[in-house]
Image (cartoon, rainbow, N blue to C red):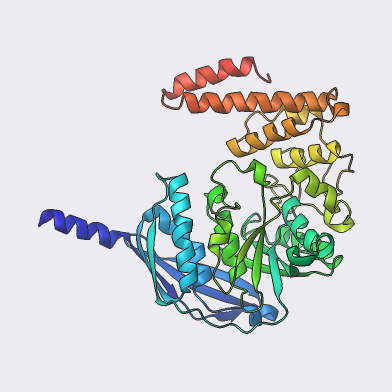
Amino acid sequence: MLAKAEEQKIDTRSSMHIWMLEPNFRNNSLRLSAILEIAAREPFKIWFEIPDEFSEYVSESAEPFVLGAIFSAMGMGGKLHVHGHVSQSLLRNLSEFQAAWHNWLPNRYKTVQITADDTRELPIERTGGLSISAFTGGVDSCYTIYRHRKLVSGAAKRTIEAGLLIHGFDIPLEQEESFSRAASAAQQSLSAIDTKLITMKSNLFNPDWENTHGAMLAACLMTLQGRYEEGLIASSYAYTQFHGAWGSNPITDHLLSSRNFPITHDGSGTYRGEKLEAISQWEEGFNNLRVCFSNNERDKNCGVCPKCVMTLILCRSRKLSVPRSFPRDFTTQDILSLDRLTSDIGWAYADTAQRLTQPDLQDEPWMRALTRCARFNKRRLELLRTESGKPDHWRKMLLSVHELIGLR
């Protein structure tokens, strides 16, 4: 009896609910909200807010909230019930989505049984075959929109009507002026290729952003399925570069789809240097590039962080000018200063060093610095992994010794 009671207690603690709230208009915007209720935790309100001029684009389905909560739910395990509509096709896809992430990170994410009050495939009347793409002003999202507006034709081409710029992800909600400036630059870029800008606010940002960002982007895109037939998420890496769990990827992004609203992972056939070269033909998009997550004002590029330096390296390697949105070009010392790269960025630097094989680059001081930086960070990360089971003071000592033979 005691074992049975303990089992029931665990089941109760693991139960989760999403409760839909009535949409409401405030400050010339429409806010969609739901409560995520997890036993033994404070309820959390999830919300999306869009300008009221786009309110007719919105679907009142609970599906965006399920995508927004999926990683929180997988972190808990157990059962999630949605008090609203979620199509059977999305539930089926999310079952496979969870299986992938549980296989990649079994200690972090469990599989969750998701049920809903209404699982019908609701008919949605739309015309024009229009798509919408998530847009930040970075290399990947610029390339996806420019590619479909200007470069491809035939079956591969999507009719992208709008780019969706989200306040609350790379630009925190409290930075209203920064977001306003970023939106102005995005408007200038997109207008030049006859594309609409839609802005949105959301509180979905998750500190585990490297894993969760694909689902969060899909959630925001899916709120607009009343008008659009498809949502696009620009690829972070080419197919040959995909190397493990990353929030947006060609394996699991499409599993964030319903029958009514597919999510497409776009652009993995193209390496980032090739993307930059393509969008250099789009003057406004190229000169308004925004790639930086390190600057205090998030609408601006700092010019010295790993993402900024990588973008500038790729520009120089392809003999492109420095985009006007960067304060300056990089220096050799900027590269040599990058001695604390994360595993994903470190891998990207190593991959770039291997790809830049043009003979005229090999004797460039910055190219030698790039090779040295990539090699050092690879060794440093391997050392940290190898020594992860040893006491901290041993790891620190070994790392200090290691640095003596590295960049320093």
Q: Where does the image place residue 298, in percent across and percent down from the top left?
A: 70, 52
Relative to residue 277, is residue 102 drawn left or right? left
Q: Residue at x 58, y 35 (%)?
A: 343
Q: Quadrant of residue 124?
A: bottom right
The image quadrant where one finds the N terminus is: bottom left
Q: Is residue 393 visible?
A: yes
Residue 313, position as x, y percentages in the image: 80, 37
Task: Give me the residue at 77% from left, 27% from top.
Answer: 333
Q: Position of residue 28 (x, y in %)?
A: 66, 79
Where residue 207 appears, as percent x and y from the top left, is 53, 50
Where is 148 relative to 407, above or below? below
The quarter holding residue 160 reads: bottom right
* Quarter of the rendering occupied by the C terminus: top right
Instruction: Judge whether residue 28 can be spotted in this image.
Output: no
Q: As drawn, is 249 to the left or to the right of 325?
A: left
Near-viewer residue (44 or 287): 287
In this image, 232 relative to 194: left or right? Answer: left
Q: Is residue 75 left or right of residue 153?
A: left
Give the answer, above or below, for where 342 lies relative to 115.
above
Name which residue lies at 65% across and 62% down.
167
